[in-house]
Amino acid sequence: MGDVVQMHFTTPDYVIFALLLVASTCIGLFYALSGGRQRTTQEFLLADRSMSCLPVSLSLLATFQSAVAILGAPSEIYTYGTQYWFLGVSYFLGLLIPAHVFIPVFYRLRLTSAYEYLELRFNKTVRIMGTVTFIFQMVIYMGVVLYAPALALNAGKGICHMYLLRHTLSSGRIIVVLITFSEGLKAVIWTDVFQTIVMFAGQLAVIIVGAHQAGGMGEVWRKAMNGSRIASLDLNPDPTERHTFWTLGVGGVFLMLALYGVNQAQVQRYLSSRTEREAVMSCYVVFPCQQVVLCLGCLMGLVMYARYGEESPLDKGYMVLYFVMDVFRDLPGLPGLFVACLFSGALSTISSAFNSLATVTMEDLIKPYCPAMTEAKATLLSKGLALAYGLVCLTMAYVASLMGSVLQAAFSIFGMVGGPLLGLFCLGMFFPWANSTGAIVGLVAGLAMAFWIGIGNFVSRMAVPTPLLPIINATTMPLRGNMTTAVMTTLITSITAKPKPTGVQALYNLSYLWYSAHNSTTVVIVGLIVSLLTGPMKEKDLTPGTVYPVLGNLLFFLPERYREKLCCVTPLGDPVCLDMTSIKNHRVNVEKQGDSPLTLPPWKN
């Protein structure tokens, strides 16, 4: 390809980019100043449970469709081919199971925080451990998400990296403050709808213009075929292989469950729906949207390959940003549209995350100890918490800009923590005899296993010498801040042929898509063993509605007396009748029998 050509943003690019930020802010302010003006925690945190299916589904899509995904998928396809496309297979079960298992349980309990469930099912200690784990996970990930679009904007400006990064993050600080302090969940959801449209527009523009310049999609496909970028079905069962049908189609299901089943940011959207049916339908609607997003990322990667072939003008981690600037060099305004697309992804993710972080902190860590707090104080404190988390995550973004390796560790931690949390919820919902001791020990074991494998993988990868890359100009950004490479740490490994790992090294080389499955399974197995050793929970001690009767359905052929011994008789509960009153009545009945009941949150007594 020759030397890298320096390119800059033009005035139309800056205008389009600025219009996006202004529009996003105005949507947030409109909803902050309309309706109930966010005076109650129900309105601020759950949009008064008044949202319809379509905006909820688009918000579900936007929440984790951040700048890191927009940059990462095309780079993956450009480098390794279309095997990654098979991830779409996992979307079916990854969204069907939340729709018919997790949503009915959460919605019928009328929760605000997903971690309230853990106290109803186990005890307060399990709830606090789950909440703290989630906060740790999201704060680190948000720093990475906020750092990604800052790098993209610097690529367009083409001058000193650190100077512009600080100013980009400073401008982002203003938007974050407005988003986190003034917006409630309703504003976040409608902002997500707008930003999802911008994301689609930016990606479509790149694909259409890039394919036209390459000679059409037929020519793009032909070049990809000739370059061995169109992958066939790989049925290799080796779990250390990065991408096979099994890692993508099966391991990906657990990754999707960790995101769409038990993550507070998504659960909060389900709970904001007007009815349980609307919440379930939002999962069905987001399924085709996810497929479209995956296709757009893969097509962009193929168009990139058709344009550059094997002779990349710079490190493949930066190809997406350079490709966009190269394709749109004669089309003023479109580079600004794509960077606006990246910022839309980042703003959707961080606004959702800050609101969910404020929710779990208020509902799980503050309200239980301050039951007399007035609604006005609780709402104001929720806004302050969202703002505080925004500032903390901005600090994480600055740290990430100074230490490139932190980016790699941050995304690895995000992937490692989701699996144990998924295992904790599955332990409670699917295994009635699991007790609180088993849940605590299982979660600790799952986190220990996750960090052992994740850190081992990171250290072993760092021990492998990496060839130095050529120095490039500021337009293509300094390599030590490579966001795409950081985000794909668990996604992209060296393509150099290496001997097959054995022993512990094989565990360190486990495909990143198996992380959630492996770690959640660890929690369930350890939790069940400890529960059986310390005395399994009796069915009469279970809080109504906290166990999904999957075992009862699977073991329908057994006589009822055997299913009762396995705690497989209790139904989930009627979606209309099951509420906190029935749960409290159950607690009273248990007390009359002289057993130690599960405690309810003080503010629901």
Image (cartoon, rainbow, N blue to C red):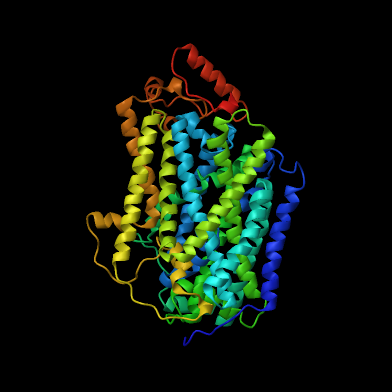
* Residue depicted at x 61% and y 77%: 209
Examine the rendered structure and indicate whether residue 260 appears above or below residue 309.
above
- Residue 184 lies, in percent from the top left, at 67, 46
Residue nearest the viewer, comparing 494 with 468: 468
Along the horizontal axis of the image, is 143 left or right of 338? left
Q: Residue furthest left?
A: 503
Vertically, is 571 above or below 325? Answer: above
View extreme (right): residue: 34
Q: Quadrant of residue 122?
A: top left
Q: Is residue 577 left or right of residue 515?
A: right
Observer-nearest residue: 206 or 458? 458
Q: Residue at x 55, y 40 (%)?
A: 361
Count of number-bearing discs: 0
Determine the residue located farthest toward the bottom in the rendered image: 2
Query: From where the camera sits, is residue 365 visible?
Result: yes
Q: Is residue 296 visible?
A: no
On the image, the x and y values in percent for residue 497 come to 28, 71
Q: Position of residue 565 (x, y in %)?
A: 37, 22
Image quadrant holding the C terminus, namely top right
Image coordinates for residue 555, horizontal then vertical, percent: 40, 30
Residue at the (64%, 83%) spot, across then down: 330
